[in-house]
Image (cartoon, rainbow, N blue to C red):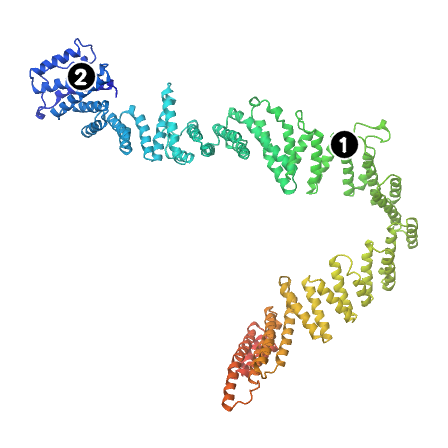
C-alpha cells in the first residue's frame, strides 16, 4: 500500500478521535472538553504552522504532564503526524526503514498503553501496514488477523482480507488465501473485487480445483465484458481481459479443453441474459490459440469444432471452419481438408440454419468458398461417376445432384455484387446442364427430363459453353424415349417431345431419325394408314436427295433413313392386305442395295404376298393349289415351301386321316429337317401315332427327342417313351428307359420316384428280388435326400418300399433258427431283426396312415418272434435235469424283454383306434394281445366297440 493510502487513513483517524467526545460518562472515557474544539477545516486548509512546529508544541505539552486523556489524544495525534511526515518525506531506503521501525514502536506502545481505545482500529491497521513495508510478513499477518478478529465490521475489512490473502498466497498457503479472497468478494469494496476474483481463481487453480477456478475467471470476464460495453476507455479492461483469457485457457488445458469450456459456459449463467456470440467465440478462439502454442494441435482444432457445433448459424462458425480447412491444407492433410470443406458446405450452404438466418452481408462472405467447394466436389463426383458402372455409377451421380443444386441456389440467392466474377466463373446454364446430366445418371428421370426440356426450349443460354439448346432438347428426347414404356402418359410425352424436336430443331442431325421414329411408332401402333400418309415426309426430307435445288434448311437427308421409311411403307401395305401394292413396293426395295438379312426378309415377304393371295377366302381349292404351286416354282428357296407342305398336312389332320398324315409328316420331316416347324411336325407325328395307337412307333419317336433340344424336353420325352414302351409290353425297353430316366433326372423328385417305383414293379414281374430291393433302397434314400421337395405321393412310395424292405429283412430273420453255437445264430438273427426294425421305423416316420399300423404290427411281431425263437432254440446236449432247468430259466429271462416290447408295440398299434383307424393290422394287434395277455384282452367287447367306433 502506498504512503498516500496511509495519509488518508490518518485523516480518517482524526475523525475517529473527534468522535470520541460522544462516549458516555459511565464508560469512564475522558472528555475532550479541556481541549479546544476540533476544526474540521484544518484537514484541508493550509496550516499556519508546520508539522515540525506542531510536533515540538505537542512534546512541550507532554513534558508538562497533562491529564491522562489529554496525553492520550496528543500521543495519537503525534502518531498520525509522524506517519504523515514519513509519507511526505523522500528518504533513502535505510533511513525509511529506521523511521518505519520508530513508527512500529510508537504504534505498539499506544496499543499497550491504551488497549481499549476505540481508535486502535486505525493504529493496528497502520501497524500491520508498517510491518508489510518492512517485509515482515508474519508480523503483518498477525496484526491483520487481530484486526479482523477485533473489528470484523471495519471499513478496512475488505482491504485487510485482501492483504491477508496476498500474504497467504505468497506463502503458498492457497486454501487460506482462497478463503481470504472469497471474503473480499463478499465484502463491500468494489475496487478490490476484480483483483480478488482473479486471485481467487488462481488459488483454486493452485489447489487443482480447476472447475471452481474457471468459474471465477469466467465471472471476471463476464464483468469486464459488460464494462467494455459501457465504458469508452477500454484499454485497461482489455488488458485485464487478455490476461484473464490466457489464464482461463491455461486452466482449461489441464482439463478436457474445449469440453470443459463448454461445460463451464453451461454451468455459469451470464448476469445479463446470454453471452454474446462474439464473446463466446473469443473464449473458444483464445483457448484454441493457446493450445496451438503448446503444440496441442488436435485439441486446438477440437475447440474450434465445438464452437461450430453449438453455434453453426453464426458467421464466426464459418470463419472457424475456414481456419480448420486452412490448417489441414497447410499441414498437407488432404483428406481432412476435403472433409472439412464438405462440412463447410453442409453447415453454411443452402438449407443450413446459417443460410436461413444469415444477413446478406454474411451470405456474401461465404459465397466464394461455397461456390469453390461445391464446384470441386460436384465435378469430382460427376467425373468419378462417369467412369463407373452399375449401382456405383448411379450413386456417384446422385451424390453430385445436391451439390449442383446448392450452387444454383447460391448463385441465385446471393447478391451479385458480393462476388461478381461468380456469373462468369460458374455459368448457371452449364451448371443446370450438369445437374440434368446428374439427374439422368442417378436415375431421377423425371427431374432430368424437366430440366433438359427447359434448357432445350425455354432457358436463356447466353453463358452456356458446354452445350447448345438442340443438345439439351435431344437429351430430353432420348430420356423421354427411355421412359416411354412406363405408362401411357410417358408414351404421350415422348410423342410430344419428338414432334417438338422435329419442329424446332430440324437442323439437328438426328431430326430425320426422330421423324422416322414417329413413323415407326405409328407402325407399332398398327396405324398403317398414318404410316402410308406420313412416310413421304421422311422419304422426301430436305427435298430430293439427288436434286440439290429442292433441298431446304433441314439437315441433309440420309439415304438409309429413306430406305427404312420405304420399308415401313411396304410393311404397312402388307398389314393392310394390299398385297399387290406391297409386291410393287417390295420389288422397288429389292432393286436397291440392301443388307442380306433385309433382302432375305423382303424376298420372303414377296413370297408371302403371293402366298397370301392363295389364302383369300374367295379363292377356290384349285386356285389355292395353283398359288402354292406357283410359289414353289417361282421362289424355290422361300420358306413358304415349308408352309405350303405344312398346310397340306394340316388339311389331312383336319380330315382325321391319321395314316395319310403320318406319311406326309415323315416326308415333311425328312425334307425340312431343322426348321421351326420340324419340332411341331414331330409333335404332330407323335400325336398321330398316339391317335392311331401305334405305341411302339410313338416311343421310338420320343426316344429320338431324348438327345436333342433342351434338358426339360429330353426328360419329358424319355419319361413318356418309358410309359409307351410299357403300354406296348416291351418291358426290356421300358426297363432301359425307366432306368435311364432315374439315373439322369433326379428332379423333379416326384417323377424320379415314380420312375424308380416302375422299375421295382417291372423287376417284381421278373422276380428279380435283388434289383427290386436296390431300387427300393434308392426310393428311400432319395426321399430322405429331397425331403423338402416331397409330397404325399412320394412319402407314400418311400413308406411302402421301406415296408417291403423291412419284410425282406423279416423273412431273412425268420429263416434263421437259433441253434448251437447259439451266439453265432443269435447275432445273425439280431442283425436281420435290427435291419427290419430300422426300415419299419423309417416307414412309420412318413406318417402314411394306411401303412403305419402294418409297420408297427410287423415290428411287434419281430419282437414276439424273437422271444419265441429264444424259447424254442436248441438246448445244449449233455445237461442234467437241474442244469437244463436253469438253462430254460435263463432263456425265459432273455425272451421276456422281447415279449414285453412286443406287447407294448401291439398296444401302441391298438391306440390308433383313437385316431379313427381300424384295419386288419389293428385287428391282428388285438388278437395277438389276446394271446399274450388273455386276462386283459381276450374279451370281444374289449375291442369290438372300438372297432365299431372307428367304422
Residue 686 in the figure: left or right of residue 488: right
Seen at 81% across and 67% down, the residue is: 696
| Quadrant in which the C terminus is drawn | bottom right
Q: Residue 509 has which mark?
A: 1
Q: Which x, y percent locates residue 580? A: 89, 44
Name the residue beneath numbered marker 2: 82
Q: Residues within 10 Å of mark 2 (few under 14, many from 20)?
A: many
Q: Position of residue 826 (x, y in %)?
A: 58, 80
SS under mark 2: helix
Q: Quadrant of the N terminus?
A: top left
The answer to whether residue 46 is visible is yes
The secondary element bearing badge 1 is classed as loop
Q: Which mark is residue 90?
A: none
| In the depicted structure, whether residue 187 falls above or below residue 863 | above
Residue 629 or residue 387, whichever sits in front: 387
Identify the residue at horizontal 78%, vertical 58% (top origin).
708
Q: Depth-wise, is mark 1 or mark 2 nearer the camera?
A: 2
Q: Residues within 10 Å of mark 1 (few under 14, many from 20)?
A: some
Amino acid at each position: 500500500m502506498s504512503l498516500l493510502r496511509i495519509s488518508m487513513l490518518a485523516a480518517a483517524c482524526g475523525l475517529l478521535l473527534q468522535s470520541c467526545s460522544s462516549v458516555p460518562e459511565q464508560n469512564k472515557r475522558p472528555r475532550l472538553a479541556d481541549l479546544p474544539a476540533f476544526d474540521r477545516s484544518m484537514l484541508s486548509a493550509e496550516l499556519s504552522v508546520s508539522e515540525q512546529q506542531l510536533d515540538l508544541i505537542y512534546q512541550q505539552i507532554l513534558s508538562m504532564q497533562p491529564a491522562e486523556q489529554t496525553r492520550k489524544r496528543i500521543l495519537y495525534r503525534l502518531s498520525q503526524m509522524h506517519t504523515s511526515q514519513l509519507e511526505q518525506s523522500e528518504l533513502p531506503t535505510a533511513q525509511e526503514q529506521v523511521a518505519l521501525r520508530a513508527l512500529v514502536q510508537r504504534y505498539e506502545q499506544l496499543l499497550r498503553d491504551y488497549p481499549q481505545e476505540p481508535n486502535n482500529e486505525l493504529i493496528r491497521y497502520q501497524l500491520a501496514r508498517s510491518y508489510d513495508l518492512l517485509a515482515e510478513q508474519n508480523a503483518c499477518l498477525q496484526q491483520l488477523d487481530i484486526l479482523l478478529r477485533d473489528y470484523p465490521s471495519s471499513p478496512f475489512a475488505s482491504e485487510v482480507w485482501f492483504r491477508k490473502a496476498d500474504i497467504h498466497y505468497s506463502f503458498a498457503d492457497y486454501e487460506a488465501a482462497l478463503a481470504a479472497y472469497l471474503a473480499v468478494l463478499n465484502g463491500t469494496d468494489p475496487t478490490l473485487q476484480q483483483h480478488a476474483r482473479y486471485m481467487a481463481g488462481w488459488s483454486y487453480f493452485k489447489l487443482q480445483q480447476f472447475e471452481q477456478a474457471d468459474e471465477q475467471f469466467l465471472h471476471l470476464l463476464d464483468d469486464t465484458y459488460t464494462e467494455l460495453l459501457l465504458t469508452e476507455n477500454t484499454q485497461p479492461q482489455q488488458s485485464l481481459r487478455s490476461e484473464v483469457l490466457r489464464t482461463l485457457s491455461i486452466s482449461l488445458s489441464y482439463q478436457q479443453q474445449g469440453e470443459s469450456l463448454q461445460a463451464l459456459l453451461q454451468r455459469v449463467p451470464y448476469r445479463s441474459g446470454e453471452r454474446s456470440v462474439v464473446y463466446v467465440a473469443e473464449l473458444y478462439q483464445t483457448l484454441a490459440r493457446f493450445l496451438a502454442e503448446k503444440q496441442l494441435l488436435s485439441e486446438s482444432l477440437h475447440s474450434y469444432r465445438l464452437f461450430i457445433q453449438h453455434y453453426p448459424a453464426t458467421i464466426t462458425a464459418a470463419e472457424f471452419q475456414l481456419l480448420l480447412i486452412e490448417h489441414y491444407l497447410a499441414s498437407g492433410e488432404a483428406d481432412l481438408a476435403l472433409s472439412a470443406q464438405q462440412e463447410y458446405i453442409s453447415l453454411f450452404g443452402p438449407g443450413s440454419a446459417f443460410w436461413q438466418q444469415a444477413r446478406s452481408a454474411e451470405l456474401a462472405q461465404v459465397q466464394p468458398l461455397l461456390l469453390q467447394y461445391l464446384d470441386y466436389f460436384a465435378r469430382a463426383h460427376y467425373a468419378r461417376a462417369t467412369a463407373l458402372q452399375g449401382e456405383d455409377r448411379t450413386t456417384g451421380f446422385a451424390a453430385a445432384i445436391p451439390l449442383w443444386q446448392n450452387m444454383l441456389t447460391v448463385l441465385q440467392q446471393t447478391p451479385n455484387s458480393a462476388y461478381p466474377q461468380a456469373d462468369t466463373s460458374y455459368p448457371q446454364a452449364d451448371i443446370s446442364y450438369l445437374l440434368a446430366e446428374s439427374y439422368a445418371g442417378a436415375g431421377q428421370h423425371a427431374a432430368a427430363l424437366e430440366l433438359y426440356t427447359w434448357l432445350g426450349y425455354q432457358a436463356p443460354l447466353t453463358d452456356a459453353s458446354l452445350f447448345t439448346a438442340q443438345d439439351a432438347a435431344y437429351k430430353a428426347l432420348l430420356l423421354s424415349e427411355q421412359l416411354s414404356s412406363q405408362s401411357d402418359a410417358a408414351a404421350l410425352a415422348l410423342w410430344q417431345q419428338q414432334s417438338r424436336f422435329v419442329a424446332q430443331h430440324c437442323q439437328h442431325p438426328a431430326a430425320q431419325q426422330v421423324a422416322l421414329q414417329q413413323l415407326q411408332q405409328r407402325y407399332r401402333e398398327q396405324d398403317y394408314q398414318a404410316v402410308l400418309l406420313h412416310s413421304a415426309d421422311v422419304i422426301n426430307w430436305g427435298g430430293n436427295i439427288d436434286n440439290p435445288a429442292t433441298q431446304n434448311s433441314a439437315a441433309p437427308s440420309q439415304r438409309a433413313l429413306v430406305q427404312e421409311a420405304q420399308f415401313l411403307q411396304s410393311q404397312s401395305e402388307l398389314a393392310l392386305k394390299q398385297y399387290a401394292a406391297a409386291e410393287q413396293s417390295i420389288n422397288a426395295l429389292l432393286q436397291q442395295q440392301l443388307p442380306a438379312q433385309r433382302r432375305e426378309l423382303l424376298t420372303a415377304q414377296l413370297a408371302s404376298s403371293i402366298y397370301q393371295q392363295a389364302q383369300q377366302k374367295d379363292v377356290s381349292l384349285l386356285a389355292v393349289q395353283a398359288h402354292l404351286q406357283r410359289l414353289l416354282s417361282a421362289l424355290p428357296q422361300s420358306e413358304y415351301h415349308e408352309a405350303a407342305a405344312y398346310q397340306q398336312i394340316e388339311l389331312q389332320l383336319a380330315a382325321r386321316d391319321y395314316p395319310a398324315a403320318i406319311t406326309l409328316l415323315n416326308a415333311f420331316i425328312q425334307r425340312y429337317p431343322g426348321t421351326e416347324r420340324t419340332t411341331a411336325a414331330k409333335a404332330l407325328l407323335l400325336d398321330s401315332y398316339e391317335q392311331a395307337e401305334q405305341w411302339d412307333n410313338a416311343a421310338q419317336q420320343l426316344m429320338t427327342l431324348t438327345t436333342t433340344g433342351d434338358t426339360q424336353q429330353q426328360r419329358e420325352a424319355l419319361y413318356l417313351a418309358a410309359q409307351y414302351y410299357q403300354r406296348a409290353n416291351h418291358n426290356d425297353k421300358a426297363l432301359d428307359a425307366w432306368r435311364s430316366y432315374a439315373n439322369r433326372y433326379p428332379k423333379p423328385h416326384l417323377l424320379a420316384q415314380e420312375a424308380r417305383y416302375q422299375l421295382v414293379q417291372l423287376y417284381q414281374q421278373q422276380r428279380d428280388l435283388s434289383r427290386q430291393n436296390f431300387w427300393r433302397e434308392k426310393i428311400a434314400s432319395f426321399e430322405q435326400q429331397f425331403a423338402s421337395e416331397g409330397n404325399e405321393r412320394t412319402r407314400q412310395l418311400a413308406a411302402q418300399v421301406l415296408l417291403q424292405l423291412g419284410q425282406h429283412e423279416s423273412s431273412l430273420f425268420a429263416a434263421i433258427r437259433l441253434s448251437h453255437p447259439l451266439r453265432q445264430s443269435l447275432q445273425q438273427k439280431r442283425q436281420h431283426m435290427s435291419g427290419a426294425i430300422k426300415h419299419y421305423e423309417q416307414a412309420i416316420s412318413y406318417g402314411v396312415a394306411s401303412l403305419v399300423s402294418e409297420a408297427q404290427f410287423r415290428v411287434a411281431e419281430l419282437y414276439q418272434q424273437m422271444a419265441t425263437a429264444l424259447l424254442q432254440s436248441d438246448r445244449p446236449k449233455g445237461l442234467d435235469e437241474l442244469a437244463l432247468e436253469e438253462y430254460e430259466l435263463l432263456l425265459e429271462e432273455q425272451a421276456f424283454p422281447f415279449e414285453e416290447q412286443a406287447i407294448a408295440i401291439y398296444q401302441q398299434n391298438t391306440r390308433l383306434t383313437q385316431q379313427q383307424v381300424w384295419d386288419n393290422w389293428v385287428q391282428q394287434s388285438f388278437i395277438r394281445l389276446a394271446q399274450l395277455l388273455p386276462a386283459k384282452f381276450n374279451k370281444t367287447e374289449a375291442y369290438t366297440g372300438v372297432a365299431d367306433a372307428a367304422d
